[in-house]
Amino acid sequence: MNKKKLYWQVPFLLVLLIGSIAIVRCQHAMPYQHNTGFVFGTVYHITYQSNEDLQPQIDAELKKVNETFSTFDAGSMISQINRNNPVKVNSMFDEVFTLAEEVSKDTDGAFDITVAPMVNMWGFGFKTGQHPSKEKIDSLRRIVGYKKVELVGNSIRKQDRRTMLDCSAIAKGYGSDVVARLLRRNGIENFMVEIGGEIVTKGNSEQRLPWKIGVTKPTDDSLNTNQELETVLNVTDKAMATSGNYRNFYYKGGKKYAHTIDPKTGYPVQHSLLSATVLAKNCATADAYATSFMVMGIEKARRLLVRHPELMAYFIYSDARGKLRVWYSPSMKGKVVE
């Protein structure tokens, strides 16, 4: 009886094996598409395995994100909110605002999408600024703070009409997520989406290997010409975002002022953390926490990570002698390639 059953199963197993081989060969023969473009004031690079070039669909999705969150587009949804026009927010805005609020609460205000006026005042936004006075900083602190704005139904409600929203610390990551969703809807199993350094991956690269992403070594490189790598991470089936205070800065009176502003104090952060790379289930989350950690500093960030085992972090910091040091989550160990 067992022999008869085995004989019956052999043809089935052969068909299954032949079918599997055919599928693998088909996948190997399928080309990888390479799309490049410009969005959110930066360049995107998207690589995916498909017989079809999906760039028109990709650009259409990114256009929706840009029309929702671009503070440089006077007609965007967020620009209209900042002008206090009556606006019914869309699902994209709802999703990002809700996540931003969650991260703000979780980080005790280190992440704050109302901090833009302070950033601009220090000269890192769309205006060129000088070292602001204490009085000016104190005046802005009255209108900055994530608790001063809320989403009620599908409308934004502000405590002060002067409060402005800026989702730039989460929008690039969210844009990468939106493109990744599009690729998944089209049944694509192997891809990497990168928008201004915020990355989502799935499957394997064109070399049939896991996706490997470099983390740039921190240097005083305001022109972004130095691309020396500190390490390489295996980021397959993960999202990755990096924030650092070593590129956007200026000197005044012999002192360096970084682009990371503490929303609570109104001043640039002054601590040893130079770069924070975060791996998470989605890129918007990774983007928001990477920014948060740059505000919090390494010690507070490490304490928060204890509460979030689902997050992986790779920190580059400066020790007391000014030498670069590295700390990363224990769960990150298997991700560090070199």
Image (cartoon, helix red, strand yellow):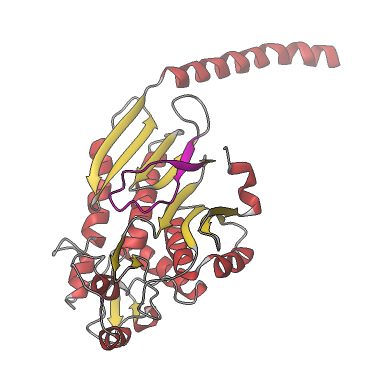
Image position, residue 266 (x, y; %): 35, 79
Q: Nearer the viewer, residue 216 or 301?
A: 216
Residue 1 in sight in this render: no
Magenta span: predominant SS is loop
Say if 130 sits above or below 239 in the image: below
Task: Give me the residue at 38% from left, 78% from top.
Answer: 146
Say if 128 sits above or below 174 in the image: below
Residue range (magenta): 211-231
Task: Give me the residue at 30% from left, 53% from top.
Answer: 222
Where the N terminus falls, by quadrant?
Answer: top right
Say if 183 sits above or below 151 in the image: above
Q: In the visual, does 30 lie left or right of 297?
A: left
Q: Quadrant of residue 287?
A: bottom left
Image position, residue 215 (x, y; %): 46, 45
Task: Reply yes or no: does residue 111 show up in magenta.
Answer: no
Instruction: Give the residue furthest to the left.
Output: 74
Q: Nearer the viewer, residue 123 or 311?
A: 123
Q: Nearer the viewer, residue 64 or 332?
A: 332
Instruction: Give the residue furthest to the right.
Output: 1
Image position, residue 299 (x, y; %): 58, 68
Q: Quadrant of residue 234?
A: top right
Q: Quadrant of residue 32?
A: top left
Say if 264 sits above or below 202 in the image: below
Where the C terminus falls, by quadrant?
Answer: top right
Q: How many marks?
A: 0
Q: In the visual, does 338 lie left or right of 287?
A: right
Task: Give me the residue at 33% from left, 28% from top.
Answer: 33
Image position, residue 211 (x, y; %): 49, 35
Residue 213 in sight in this render: yes
